[in-house]
Image (cartoon, coloured by chain):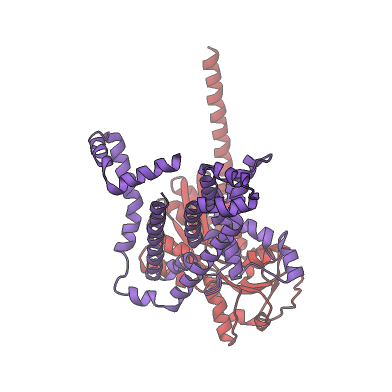
Amino acid sequence: MTRSARRTRRTLQVAGAGAAALLALSACSSSDSDSGSTKSDSSASASSSPKLSGNVTVFAAASLQESFTTLQKEFEKQHPGTTVTFSFGGSDSLAAGITGGAPADVFASASPKTMKIVTDKKDNATEPVTFVRNQLEIATLPGNPDKVSSLKDLTKSGLKVVLCDKTVPCGAAAQKALDASKLKLTPASYEEDVKSALNKVVLKEADAAVVYRTDVKAAGNKVEGVDFPESADAINDYPIALLKNSKNPEVAKAFIALVQSAEGQKVLSEAGFLKP
Amino acid sequence: MTSTDKSDAAADTLQGGPRRGRVRSGRRGVPLPLLVPALIGLAFLLLPLVALLVRAPWSTLPEQLTSTEVWQALRLSLVCATAATAVSLVIGVPLAWLLARTDFPGRGFVRALVTLPLVLPPVVGGVALLFALGRNGVVGQWLDSWFGITLPFTTAGVVVAESFVAMPFLVISVEGTLRAADPRYEEAAATLGASRFTAFRRVTLPLIAPGIAAGAVLAWARALGEFGATITFAGNFPGRTQTMPLAVYLALQNNPEAAIALSLVLLAVSIAVLAGLRDRWMTAS
């Protein structure tokens, strides 16, 4: 008697919660489709096609960590029942992971060259599209105590500079900028991805690092950014593609659409990325 | 007592005498629920190594292995692992003696602390080392301002990282040997007027030499394979801090063939170490 009563109450509660969620969902999607032209694209697919659910795994360049995490929250809010998991790292090691059979749905890399590793093996399901570009910047200790003002200043003896390894896009770009200005730089270390290069400056182990503008911005006041004109010669295109092994291509496509939408681009440009 | 038991057993295995019959009769009775998982386990351990050999680029192997990067990394690895073993011996053996032969409050706790780097993820060890000995670290900032010594990004930093990870292997091994060794020899030395240090030097050390050797080889092998703490604490620069495991990891991204070649070298070194260790154990008992 009491048990059945309790059960009915629970069913009612569940039903109520479900109804509330449905209401919230419809309210959300209708307000979405009302505003913005590009935005309605991504949400229209969400409301018209069968409801999206399930998990997608996105392999993304380390420099995308902050903005993609913001977009993940946005995506999961727009599509309840979906989850986005990330693996952030050096684009080259992510590409090696994908060609080695890692279970990923989307690959967002920091250079066409690392994306090519994946497309050469025909592991992509859609053609890679450039969704942002990123420019290099010098990260120095707060207050710039070593008075670094140009790329050339980094070659001063006694200055501990870390670069990304040449196999990683940020390292390749840094090398390109150095070569273009005929500078020879012997770093203290070639780090395996851009975040570990940045962290060496954040931890004050290195005096400067050549990283992306977005990383300097993400680090806040822990580092100070110094622009250098040569960085214009080494701007990285960031391509994104759906992968062949995707177990959930619909959700993955919706995530790529969000990244390319006006809303996604706003988040990315706030993080310091350049428009494609 | 135990040591003589062990030597008997080893002698039996060596001669293959009285034991063989027992083993054969035992095999008939191996229950299937044990045999099948055991064989799966064996295959699981061997398969990756076989795969490495199958996929090895045998035709281009000579040129892969004669490249300067490989030799630079191998030389650095051997030098650093040996230095780390030396450091571990100098400070690890006394530590093991302290843990095995003296009694002080909280000894069990200290022992647990000593073995912590055994179970700690090496990357965490590297981060901890940065906070301790980095240029801005708790101790490191004084090293920097007083002596001008900075460890990160230097070969010395690699040795520090490897010692941190490898020393517990030596300490545990030596401590075990010390506990098994008969303390009455030292007591006899003491009654004959030897100081505790003399007894340690002239009696204990020769007694536990095989254990020290085994521990040193273990520590050396661990140091040789060390990756996480090294790349975190010492960074990655060819010829200065790029040891073999770092070279393997980074080569894998853009040149898998080179990675396999490097891995084969490490595999060969590991097998050589195992063979050496086996010999040591044989002669020890």
- Image point 35% across, 46% down: which residue? B10
- Outermost residue on the front side: it is B192
- Outermost residue on the bottom side: it is A182
- Image point 62% across, 53% down: which residue? B198
In the image shown, does B163 or A260 lie closer to the viewer?
A: B163
Q: Report whether residue A64 is seen.
A: no
- Image point 76% across, 74% down: which residue? A145
Q: Residue A6's x, y, as percent?
A: 55, 19
B159 above or below A29?
Answer: below
A12 above or below B71?
Answer: above
Q: Residue A275's x, y, as percent?
A: 58, 70
Q: Residue A3's x, y, as percent?
A: 53, 16
- Image point 54% across, 59% down: which residue? B228
In the image shown, does B184 or B249 lie closer to the viewer?
A: B184
In the image shown, does B179 or A76 lie closer to the viewer?
A: B179
Say which chain is red: A
In the image shown, does A267 or B11 lie closer to the viewer?
A: B11
Q: Report whether residue B81 is seen.
A: yes
**Hey, which quadrant is residue A148 in on the image?**
bottom right
Figure disc tally: 0
Say which chain is purple: B
Q: Residue B60's x, y, as percent?
A: 32, 75
